[in-house]
Amino acid sequence: MNATTGSVPIVGEPRLRLVDPAAGEALDAPHPATVPIRIPTRHRDEGPLALLTPREVDVFYAIAEGMTNAEIARAFTVSLTTVKTHVARILLKLDARDRVQLVVLAYRSGLMAAR
């Protein structure tokens, strides 16, 4: 348990060390760009996600959440080139022109409401 905030960290949760110079203490906090996005398995077999690999599904949701390629690379601990490859494959498989169409698809199909 974090004595300062009283919160209990989730095992394996990425942490960000925040330092309060006035108090001389370091505080643990989750870093939003490094928290892996996990999707319930039942949604992977429905609709457009059935065409994607599990990692592509993760990247698809990260895109829908508004994450940049660099943020996705940090969150999943992969190279920027790998993320770009995943994005290109997702665009191809879902017949989308760009990231904006992926976000629209995620919301119109109700996938973001399930999160």
Image (cartoon, rainbow, N blue to C red):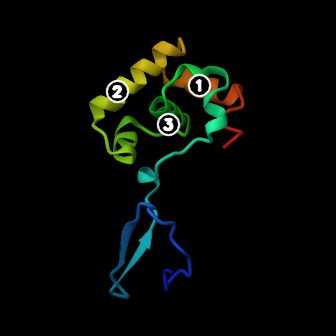
Q: Residue at x 41, y 52 (%)?
A: 34
Give the percent coordinates (x, y) of residue 95.
53, 11
Q: Earlier in the sequence, mark 3 or mark 1?
A: 1
Which quadrant of the structure image shows residue 20? bottom left
Amino acid type at circle 1 is: Leu
Q: Secondary structure at mark 1?
A: helix
Q: Secondary structure at mark 3?
A: helix
Q: Earlier in the sequence, mark 3 or mark 2?
A: 3
Amino acid type at circle 2 is: Lys
Mark 3: few/some/many CA within 10 Å (<14, 14-19, 20+): many
- How far apart are the alpha carbons under marks 3 and 2? 13 Å
Amino acid type at circle 3 is: Asp
Q: Residue at x 56, y 82 (%)?
A: 6
Mark 1: few/some/many CA within 10 Å (<14, 14-19, 20+): some
On-image quarter of the C terminus: top right
Q: Residue at x 33, y 86 (%)?
A: 24
Q: Residues at badges 1 and 2 in contact (C-beta under 8 Å)?
A: no
Vertical placement of residue 35 versus 57, above or below: below
Give the percent coordinates (x, y) of residue 102.
55, 24
Vertical placement of residue 115 versus 32, above or below: above
Give the percent coordinates (x, y) of residue 92.
46, 13
Which quadrant of the structure image shows residue 73? top left
Which of the numbered marks, if any, corresponds to residue 100? Answer: none
In the rendered structure, the answer to whether residue 71 lies left or right of residue 93 reads left
- How far apart are the alpha carbons under marks 3 and 1? 10 Å
Quickly name the residue at label 2: 84
Give the percent coordinates (x, y) of residue 54.
49, 32
In the rendered structure, the answer to whether residue 107 lies left or right of residue 54 reads right
Quickly name the residue at label 3: 58
Quickly name the residue at label 1: 49
